[in-house]
Image (cartoon, rainbow, N blue to C red):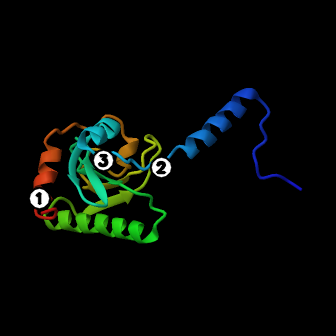
Amino acid sequence: MSSILPVIDDKKSEKALIYATQLAYFMDIIIQDHSPQNLEHLYENKFLYQTENYSLMCEETDIPWLQFIPNRSLTDVDYAANLYAEIYRVAEYLKSKGLAEHFNVAKIGNKLPYYHIHLVFRKPQDEAWPEAIWCKENLTRNSDMPHKLKELLADFYA
């Protein structure tokens, strides 16, 4: 009977496989402490809003880029469905405010072990187009973007 597991024939490859397995186990951590200070420290971006289901963070880039931080496991199907529905409501709301016509929603989680969902607004003339923004290093910093998005979302979260 053949195995679907990779054949490990050296110590370096074996260590890499063990590390990858351990890393996968520790990914998708649900943050319990949703204080703005803790989230800004962990995600290295800006806190915008908190609801009973998630916190909303923003990258300081020219490209409008939000992260939704769930406050419980998405194994609860109703919670997960409601969270993703809320993300799309936020996206449509911001589109109606003229932020951009196109957006991406993605759950990546390769660089941070904490569960988060990206909502990124894109335009053909943005600096990373058409590539994924998380593949481009050194995006242009814009410290005003969190303020702009917070103002645009004020009525939504009122």
Structural distance between the alpha carbons of marks 3 and 1:
20 Å
Structural distance between the alpha carbons of marks 2 and 3:
15 Å
Structural distance between the alpha carbons of marks 1 and 2:
29 Å
Q: Comparing marks 3 and 1, which lies closer to the viewer?
A: 3
Chain-order first, disc 2 or disc 3: 2
- The residue at which mark 2 appears reads as 28
Q: Is residue 110 left or right of residue 103?
A: right
Up-down relation of residue 118 to residue 92 (above or below): above
Looking at the rendering, in which quadrant would you find the N terminus? bottom right
Secondary structure of the residue carrying tag 2 is loop
Q: Is residue 61 left or right of residue 116?
A: left
Secondary structure of the residue carrying tag 1 is loop
Residue 34, labelled with which disc?
3
In-front residue for pair 102/11 = 11
Instruction: Estimate the x, y position of residue 5 in percent, counting from the top left.
Output: 76, 48
Instruction: Estimate the x, y position of residue 24 in percent, counting from the top left.
Output: 57, 45
Amino acid type shown at disc 1 = Ala
Mark 1–mark 2 CB contact (< 8 Å): no
Chain-order first, disc 1 or disc 2: 2
In-front residue for pair 140/88 = 88
- The residue at which mark 1 appears reads as 154
Query: Residue drawn at (17%, 46%), measured in percent from left and top?
Result: 146
Amino acid type shown at disc 3 = His
Chain-order first, disc 3 or disc 1: 3
Query: Residue drawn at (68%, 31%), measured in percent from left and top?
Result: 15
Residue count near mark 3 (Cα–Cα under 10 Å), binned few <14, some 14–19, many ≥20 = some
Residue 39, labelled with which disc?
none
In-front residue for pair 53/28 = 53
Up-down relation of residue 17 to residue 56 (above or below): above
Amino acid type shown at disc 2 = Asp
Query: Residue drawn at (14%, 52%), measured in percent from left and top?
Result: 150
